[in-house]
Amino acid sequence: MSELTFSDAGDVCMIKRNDWQIIGLVGSAHACSHFFQLLLPTLFLSLSAEFGFDFVQLGFLTSVFFLVSCMGQASSGFVVDRIGPVPVLLFGLGCLIVAAVMIGLAPGYTVLLLAAALGGVGNSVFHPVDYSILNHRVSKPRLGHAFSAHGLTGNLGWALSPVFISTLTLLFNWRVATICAGLLVAAVMAAVWLGRDRLSGQALGALRSEEGGVPEKPAKEPQAPVGVMLRTLMVQPALWGAFLFFACTATAWSGVQQYTIPLFTGTYGMEKVLASAALSSYMVLSALGMLAGGFLVSASARNELVLAISLVLAGALLAVLAMGVVSNSTLAVLLLVLAGFASGVSTPSRDMLIRRVTPKGSTGSVYGLVYSGMDVGSSLGPIMFGAMVDHGLREGPWYGAGIAFALAAWLAIMVARFGAAKKTAAQGA
């Protein structure tokens, strides 16, 4: 992206306002993606009561969602490069709306499976679309703010979903709650449609560059073919480590996000709304942890150590929670939100570590790779943890999340070592 300069203070204010409007639209859409990721897990108890599903069946719905999202992640990047990000973003939001309506009207398991698959299709587009828009439409001085806001809005989408769905389920029923979730996404889709010119760069036409002309649209970045991406993966140990790292962290997140509500209601006797509020608090504290982690990234060059320590701490807190040694529900919620804060602290260091080990000119390929790892972990975790709960290991998801966080911490150290060894070898060549 070519850096633009502007001839007067008015132009600077206009481009700044344009940047923040783009960041706001993209962030709102990203929040919808994360909101929808927790829609089905928040409905687990309601769906079980309505249809008699066990936790393996319920977990499989989420697995289908993330498996489809995983398969669509890389291909949606090619579509974005071909037709532009805005149509793909509108398509993704539309898929989430239709999926929500299907869930709300579902007569049984088959329709729920189809809705989960359609939701996965919608979810698959957001990261390629979002980062394409932010990289090409936001001016360089605010790119850091854009990426930070993107991560925070995702966490806030996670935080809103349990409270939104559980509250409306309590006031009305789970079907009304799901339809209202679709209407919420529809409102964001309408805002994206109204702001489509801004997101596509056409709104910059009124702004002047240093020469007084219309700012030139950035050229599309070339994207490596899938075969090249896979061959790169096969010969890069650091990228394998990064893939597995994201799979482990996503597995841990799935254990916390999708089973905390039934675990709190069963193990600590909480009301469902209070358990949902505790999960939302976990997400909010995770977002605050991301802000704190941003300062640690600047203060330390050893990002892998910050990353490993924060993940081990998060895992240890979840293990204590699973042991049942906590005397009351208030302290249990405190441990949960502290685990959320610790896991959030790791996020900026994670992003910096992945950037350090990414081969030059392969950003797109590596980006698709690591996020596919997240989808793999998110799809496998629900089935594995659901089987634990169904076989009587009620606290299994918390134990599993703690182990997965600890394994991810070890992988972070390995990734950093692989990257350092490669850099040393390159300098010696």
Image (cartoon, rainbow, N blue to C red):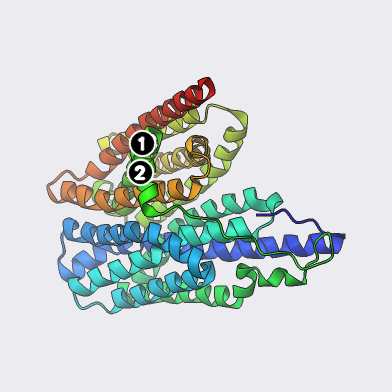
Q: Nearer the viewer, residue 215 or 114?
A: 215
Q: Position of residue 339 (x, y in %)?
A: 41, 39
Q: Is residue 187 left or right of residue 219?
A: left
Tell which residue pokes out farthest to the left in this image: 391
Tell which residue pokes out farthest to the top in this image: 428
Marks 1 and 2: in contact by CB < 8 Å?
A: yes
Q: Is residue 406 shown above or below 48?
A: above
Q: Is residue 364 shown above or below 412?
A: below
Q: Position of residue 231 (x, y in %)?
A: 35, 43
User: Which residue is rendered at x = 39% and y = 52% of the image?
Assistant: 279
Badge 1: how crowded within 10 Å, few (<14), some, or many (20+)?
few
The residue pinned by badge 1 equals: 235
Q: Is residue 136 left or right of residue 57?
A: right
Amino acid residing under circle 1: Val
The residue pinned by badge 2 equals: 231
Amino acid residing under circle 2: Arg
Q: Nearer the viewer, residue 233 or 120?
A: 233
Image quadrant where residue 2 sits: bottom right
User: Which residue is rendered at x = 77% and y = 72% of the image?
Assistant: 206
Q: Secondary structure at mark 2?
A: helix
Q: Is residue 144 left or right of residue 109?
A: right
